[in-house]
Amino acid sequence: MKRKRLNYCLIAGLFLVLLAIYLFLNIKTNSYPWHNNIQITRHSVDYALGFASFSFFLALLIKKSKYLKYVAYVFVVLMFVNVLISTSVFYVYKEIFNREMAYSIMSTSYKEASNISSTFYIPIFFSLIYIVFFSVFIEKLSQVIKINTLAYVVSILWIVIPICWTFKEKRDIEAYRITHPGYGVHYVEPKFVFQTFPSFYQGINYLNDIQAVKKYKPDFSLISKTINYDAIDKVVVVVGESARKQNMSLYGYGRKTTPFEDKEKSNMFLYTDAVSPAFVTFQAVPLSLSSISMDTYAQNNFGDIADNIINVGRHFNRKTYWITGSKSEPEHILAYNAHQLIKTEDSHDGYLLPEFKKLIKNKEKQLIVLHLLGSHADAKNNYPKTHTIFKNQNSLDEYDNSIAYTDYLLGQVFEDLRDTNSAVLYYSDHGQAYTNEKFFHAPSQEANMIPLFVWYGSKVPEALRKPGVETRQTSSTIVYDLVLELMGLQNSKSNKNDQAKFLKNGKVIPFNELKK
């Protein structure tokens, strides 16, 4: 009897600890709007019931037969994935888990995943420990439960509760679509025990809606030629990745990480307070290279992405090229109509240069986009070992080496175009936060302060050469307008940089409202 009582105490203790951790992660990372203590309590009870029912369901499967036990452990694996996602989001980003993060996971290549895996060692270890104890708990529970009608009723509550919530909120299945007008404002998730999974459904629908942009025919009637039309022969746009201006000597960093850019400062128009509109590439790049406004994007109306620099350049008789070593989605959306999309080896950005050198030999009017791997995690994999400048092999040295390697590549581009009628615009999609010797994406001011400048070849007409400095806060959404200006064009409807804004959790907020 005493042993049986101890067994019950062990089961109860495991349940309470596992439930407490589950609810903590749920509250910290769920996109449901937890407005007050009453809502937190109410929804915690719902999720607690779901978690208890799910545990009972798995215990029943284990008890019924050895074959159903295998099914139970498939669900255990799903719970591990769910806990791993929640733990990673809380530990690394300290943000809710939403469609943007879900889509980032789905669009991450194997190489990118392996590169950033070191950032998630602690969440992985914690999740493994959690799931081991969860497995022990359901095994113990299966030994004491009795199979009867009540057991079956309890075991299906984790399915019934989300269904009831769906009907309660009077939403049909289309409420999961990101095109639902309430998304990001009044969107309510059903109380699904795998609370991170609905965001993947939203991410899939987001991808489908973005892909539909390829079917749009942009309206170029608002774009007109200026007196400088065709004045610059080659316009080169270099899209950096995860580059913090805080780690660039061009912006006052103590280490000499950008010597090539430093030497060219007098030949640039430099933005000293440039910021990104989003902290993930697949949002930041379309927002900067197309005419879409942030408010329109937040409403999930993506048609204006078709009015992008590639389509504009092509429409106005420039040869358009996109060279990349990255496999992320923005290329598929923005570059699909380029005259040529060139994909190189994805080990480091040096592989882009030979392709670039071939293209600029042509005498045609050109718009060339170079999309870099830059300083994307894990930064140590983004530069050849022969370009190791800072040698302590810590995350800061590795990141600074990646910044220095991008600077070296920009130096090569400058030399190739120095005595030509060409202009180079460089900016980074977003930056990185740096905390506890780790670099990571984050919706914060620190993580989205980026480099942005325009460099001029010696044969650019004096009327178009504008070396100088802009000290006002400037969003990289202005890049679309800057590129059109370099091509001698202007879009009469574009007023994208009236105020630096940021896209966070489906809402547009002033950049300065982000945490620092």
Image (tube, helix red, strand yellow):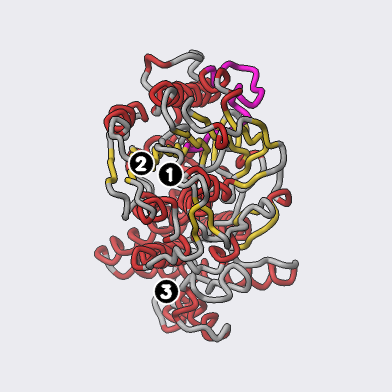
Say which element carries label 2: loop
Depicted 359 relative to depicted 98: above or below: above
The image quadrant where one finds the C terminus is top right
Answer with mark 3 or mark 1, whichever residue precedes in sequence: 3
Residue 158, position in %: x, y? Answer: 48, 73
Q: Is residue 253 magenta?
A: yes
Q: Is residue 91 toward the left or the right of residue 83 in the image?
A: right
Q: Nearer the viewer, residue 447 or 9?
A: 447
**Can you tell which of label 3 and label 2 is closer to the viewer?**
2
Amino acid under disc 3 = Lys
Name which residue lies at 48% across and 18% down. 393
**Can you tell which of label 1 and label 2 is closer to the viewer?**
1
Name which residue lies at 42% across and 61% down. 306
Q: Which residue is mark 3?
A: 146
The crowd level at tag 1 (other Cα within 10 Å; few <14, some 14-19, many 20+) is some
Depicted 248 relative to depicted 171: above or below: above
Q: What secondary structure predominates along the stretch shown in magenta? A: loop
Name which residue lies at 54% across and 17% down. 259
Q: Which residue is mark 2?
A: 365
**Can you tell which of label 3 and label 1 is closer to the viewer?**
1
Q: Nearer the viewer, residue 308 or 122?
A: 308
Answer with mark 3 or mark 2, whichever residue precedes in sequence: 3
Amino acid under disc 2 = Lys
Q: Which residue range is magenta in the image?
A: 240-259
